[in-house]
Amino acid sequence: MVRLPWPDGVLAADPTRTVPLPLREQADVRDRWLTQRLLDVLPGLMDDAGIDLWLVVGRENAEDPVLRTLLPATWLTARRRTILVLHRSDDGVTPVAVSRYPVGQFLPAWADDEVPGEPYERSQWAAVRRFVEQAAPRAIGIDVSTSVGAADGLSHADHGLLVEALGPWADRLVPAEPLAVRWLETRLPEEVEALRVLNARLQEVVAEAFSPAVLEVGRTTAADLAWELRQRLGDLGLDPWFHPVVDLQRAGVPPLAERGTLLPAVPYDEPVLPGDLVHCDVGAVTLGLHADLQRTAYVLRPGETAAPAGLARAFTQGTRLQDLTTAHLVPGRTGDEVLAATREAAAVEGVDGEVYSHPIGVHGHAAGPAIGLWDEQDGVPGAGGHRVYVDTAFALELCVRLPVPEWGGQCVRMGLEEGVVLTASGVAYLGDRQRELLLLPGG
C-alpha cells in the first residue's frame, strides 16, 4: 500500500493518507492549495507578466481551462457565466467573483438584481466595467492564445461582450498567455509530493498488470493488459487521462515506419509470447494533478535468465538519452533550446532517438515549454518557445532506436517515460526510475 506523507500544514489529521484520498479530504486539500497559490504564487507571476488585472471568464459547457484551476473543489463546472477578476495591488492579489452564485473564497462583486429592470447578463457585464473603472489597471489580461490551448479559454462570444462592456477600457486588453502558462505550470512543494506518490501508485499498478497473476503468457493480449490497467485505476478511484497503451515488439515482426518514426507492428489482439518486448504507457489523475509513466519488460524464453544483450543495450541507450535531456533542462532556456542541445549531444554519442517531453500537472500535456514532439524534432512552434522555470514538473518522454543482433538486426523502438520536477538544485525524479528492462517469466 502506498501512503502519502502529507507535509505539515496541508492536513492536520493523520500525516499518512492513502492515495487516492477520500473525496471530501481531496476537496479540503485542493482548496488549501488554491489559497496558498493565490497568496504566494500569483502575485509574482502577475508582476512578471506585467498584468495587474486578470479576467477569467467561462460558461457552463464552455469552461476556460484556467477557470477550473481557480474554482472551489466543489465546483465541477462553471455556473451560468462565471467571471473571476484577479486584481494585483500593493496588498497582493484580490480575488473577486462576478457571478450569480458565491464562488468559494472569491469576494462577491455583483448581485444580479442590483440594476432594476436590466437582464442579469447585462447587469453582470456592467459590474465588470465598474470594477475595472475602480481598479484603473494598466493591463487587463484575457485568456486568448494562438499557440497554447490551455491559455485560449475566452470564447469568441464572451470576448465580444467583454469588449463591448469595457468601452474605452478595452484598449488595455492584452493576451494573458505568459501569465496563464506560468500559473498552470508552477507547482507547490505539496503538489510535487502528491505527484511523487501518484507516480509510485502508477508503478504499483503496472507491476500488478505485469505479474503472472494477470499476464498469462500465451493467452493475455496487449489489449487485455490495457483494459486491466484501466480497470485497476478505476477500482482504486483514480481517473485515467488517456486510455492505457500496451504494445508488443517481437523478433520477426519488423516495426512500421510512419512519418520518420517506428511503431510496433504486433497486433493488439495477439497474445504475449516468450521473447516479446512488452511496453505500456499509463496516466492517472488525483487531486487535480496528472501523472504519466511508461514501463518496458522482456518475457523470458525457456532457459533464459536475462534479456538479449541487444535489447538491454537499447534500454541503456534510452536511459542515456534521459540523462542528456535532464542535463540540458536548465532554467531560462526555451523548450526548443533544450531539445536542440539534447539532440546535438545525442548525435555526438551516436544515440538515435526522439525527445518529446512535456510539462505535466493540472493537465496531462500541460502548458509550458514543449521539448519536442515525436514528429517535430527541430522545434515546436509556439510551445517550444516557452522558457523553463523551476517548480515545473515534466513527463520525461522519449525513445531510442537500435538494431538488435539477436533479432537478426531487426530494429527496436525503446520508449521510456518518467515523471521529473525541476528544482533549484536540478532535476529530481518523481519516483523510482526504471534503469533496466523488467524481466517476466515466460511460463
Image (spheres, rainbow, N blue to C red):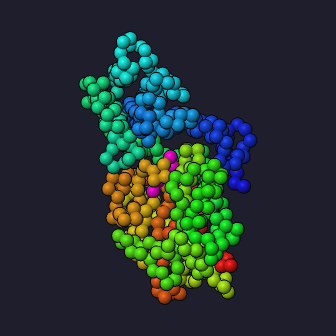
Query: In the picture, which quadrant includes the C terminus?
Result: bottom right
Report whether 18 appears left or right of 155.
right
In percent of the image, x 36 and y 12: which residue is there? Answer: 117
Towards the viewer: 340 or 330: 340
**Residue 212: image location, x then y, percent:** 69, 71
Q: Is residue 383 visible?
A: yes
Residue 377 position by quadrant? bottom left
Q: Is residue 179 visible?
A: no
Report whether 68 appears left or right of 25.
left
Q: Which residues are magenta?
A: 358-362
**Residue 26: image location, x then y, percent:** 62, 40
Towards the viewer: 110 or 258: 258
Residue 316 position by quadrant? bottom right
Task: Examine the rendered structure and indicate whether residue 270 appears above or below residue 124.
Answer: below
Towards the viewer: 276 or 344: 276
**Residue 71: image location, x then y, percent:** 51, 34
**Residue 307: image location, x then y, percent:** 60, 81
In percent of the image, x 35 and y 35: which residue is there? Answer: 141
Q: Residue furthest right?
A: 14
Task: Examine the rendered structure and indicate whether residue 105 appears above or below residue 282.
Answer: above
Magenta stretch contains residue 22: no
Task: Examine the rendered structure and indicate whether residue 49 appears above or below residue 341.
Answer: above
In percent of the image, x 48 and y 22: which residue is there? Answer: 108
Residue 401 position by quadrant? bottom left
User: Would you say the magenta stretch is mainly helix, strand or loop?
Assistant: loop
